[in-house]
Every structure is written in C-alpha cells, then in structure tokens.
C-alpha cells in the first residue's frame, strides 16, 4: 500500500510540470534506444545466403526456433581469374624501343665486352640502388655477366643513369625518359 501511494505521488510530481515531463520522456526514449542498440550489438544476425537452392531451406530454418543451424556454402576450388594478372586494357604493353644509348663500337679489342654491356638493361633506380636485368645492385657491387672474364662494377648511380666500370673503362646505362 505504501509503495502504491509513493508511486502515485512520484507520478504526480513528474507530470505536474510539462517541461520536466518532456525532459523525462526524452531521456527515457534515448535510454531505450541505447538499450536496444546494445542488444543488437550483443547478438548480431549471422545469416548468409550463397546459393539460390539453399534459400528455401533457409526460409524454413528462420521460421523455426533453431537459430544455430549450419548452412553449407560451396566455394570454387580455383578462382575464376588471377587477381595478380595485369590487365592489358588498363596497362597496355609498350613495344616502343627505349632511348637507351647503345654502346658505340670502338675498335680496341673489347668487342665481347661492349656486346655484353649493350645487352644489360637498366630497369629502375631508387636512391643508391639500381635494378639491372631484374637484379638489384648498389654502388660497389659486381654486376655479373657470364660472357665476360673481367668484372663489371657499379660505380655511380645518377637520377636516370648508372656508370659501370671495367678496369679503367666506363660505360653508362640509361633509363628511357617517360613518354608524354
């Protein structure tokens, strides 16, 4: 009895002032929304439909009380396309020759050396590193060519070229300038 009287008295105090009652109702609504959000976050729905044939069994399981049923999903054993393959439409293959300067033939008995160096291709430069024929070298490294008896040494790296030395002789490899 005492509880009922106290509740009635509290209700009258709350509803007596319209402003207080409006604030009370607004806070109650925000509290209910937050409470509902906590419930949704605590139990997120775990439903995925991967095949149309399974959709009928999913509908019957959703209608039942068993929410922990497992649904089979069949995946391809191999991907349909290679995700690492470069698209020729987006990145066409450029077959134009580069502006690498070919070694001028000087008749001093170093024909095999010049031919071997002319076969080298400078692919990239980054700081003091240079990529020549798919291998990364830094200043002072030996660039190996199987057809030569003397060692090729990477002497200097510039922005778009490198200097390779063989004993006292020096050769320059350059990267093609970007086409506009």
Image (spheres, grey):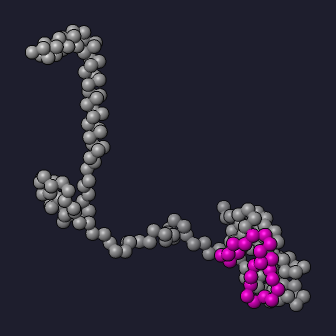
Front-most of 122 and 148?
A: 148
**Point 26% across, 36% down: residue:** 36
Residue 15 visible at all: no
**Point 78% across, 67% down: residue:** 157
Q: Is residue 92 above or below residue 65?
A: below
Question: Which portion, as a residue range, is magenta?
Answer: 132-153
All told, the count of numbered labels is: 0
What is the quadrant of the N terminus in the image?
Answer: top left
Residue 149 is a magenta residue: yes
**Point 77% across, 74% down: residue:** 141
Q: Is residue 67 above or below residue 144?
A: above
* Left or right: where 19 falls relative to 12: right
Q: Name the residue furthest top.
A: 16
* Left or right: where 57 falls relative to 123: left
* Left or right: where 51 falls relative to 159: left
* Left or right: where 84 falls relative to 28: right
Q: Position of residue 45 (x, y in %)?
A: 25, 50
The quadrant where residue 133 appears: bottom right
Q: Position of residue 91 (x, y in %)?
A: 54, 67
Front-most of 167 and 36?
A: 36
Q: Name the residue furthest front.
A: 2
Q: Position of residue 48 (x, y in %)?
A: 26, 57
Q: Position of residue 75 (x, y in %)?
A: 31, 69
The quadrant where residue 23 appears: top left
Q: Is residue 43 above or below residue 77?
A: above
Residue 9 is a magenta residue: no
Front-most of 28 and 143?
A: 28
What is the quadrant of the C terminus in the image?
Answer: bottom right
**Point 15% across, 61% down: residue:** 57
The quadrant where residue 175 appears: bottom right
Residue 84 visible at all: yes
């Amino acid at each position: 009895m005492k509880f009922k009287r106290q509740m009635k008295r509290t209700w009258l105090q709350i509803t007596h002032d319209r402003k207080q009652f409006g604030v009370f109702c607004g806070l109650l609504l925000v509290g209910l929304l937050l409470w509902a959000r906590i419930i949704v976050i605590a139990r997120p729905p775990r439903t995925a439909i991967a095949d149309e044939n399974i959709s009928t069994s999913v509908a019957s399981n959703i209608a039942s009380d068993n929410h922990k049923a497992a649904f089979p999903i069949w995946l391809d054993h191999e991907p349909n396309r290679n995700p690492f393959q470069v698209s020729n439409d987006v990145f066409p293959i450029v077959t134009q020759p580069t502006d690498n300067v070919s070694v001028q033939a000087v008749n001093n008995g170093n024909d095999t050396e010049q031919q071997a160096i002319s076969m080298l291709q400078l692919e990239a430069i980054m700081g003091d590193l240079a990529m020549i024929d798919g291998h990364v070298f830094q200043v002072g490294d030996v660039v190996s060519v199987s057809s030569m008896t003397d060692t090729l040494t990477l002497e200097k790296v510039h922005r778009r070229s490198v200097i390779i030395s063989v004993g006292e002789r020096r050769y320059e490899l350059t990267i093609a300038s970007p086409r506009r």
